[in-house]
Amino acid sequence: MTAAPADADSGNWVDRHAPEALRPYLRLMRADRPIGTWLLLIPCWQGLALGAIVAPPTPLTALWQAALFAAGAVVMRG
């Protein structure tokens, strides 16, 4: 599985920067096309922002929750 999909750009970040051993898995995850991750992540971050209005968290807690949502969006998407 060395060839990229026919509809993928040849200069995407997976082909340019990812290690050769990880490329098939990143292509399987469609990591070079992050729209699904963004569609999951943006509403999560909006929910965090709305929740912070009602009960303001500490900065470390807010960053931790944002990072957890980001990791969850990548895992759920991939």
Image (cartoon, rainbow, N blue to C red):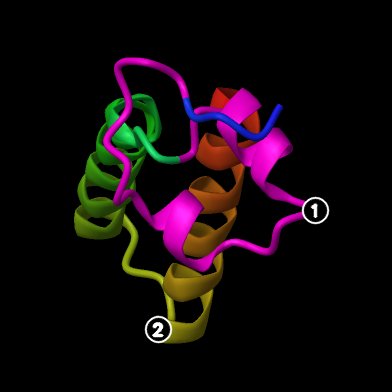
Instruction: Identify the residue shown where x is 32% and y is 27%.
Output: 8
Q: Is residue 13 magenta?
A: yes
Please provide percent x and percent y for residue 23: 65, 45
41 relative position to 70: left or right: left
Using the rendered view, name the quadrant where residue 25 is placed. top right
Q: Residue at x 64, y 24 (%)?
A: 28
Relative to 20, is 73 above or below? above
Residue at the farthest front position = 3
Q: Amino acid at mark 2?
A: Pro
Q: Write down the region rendered in magenta.
A: 5-31
Quadrant containing the N terminus is top right
Q: Is residue 62 left or right of residue 76?
A: left
User: In the image, what residue occupies the spot 80% across and 53% down?
Assistant: 21
Q: Nearer the viewer, residue 22 or 68?
A: 22
Vertical comparison of 22 with 46: above or below:
below
Question: For residue 21, which numbered disc appears in the image?
Answer: 1
Q: Which residue was labeled with disc 2?
A: 59
Given contact means CB atoms under 8 Å apart, are the residues at marks 2 and 1 in contact? Answer: no
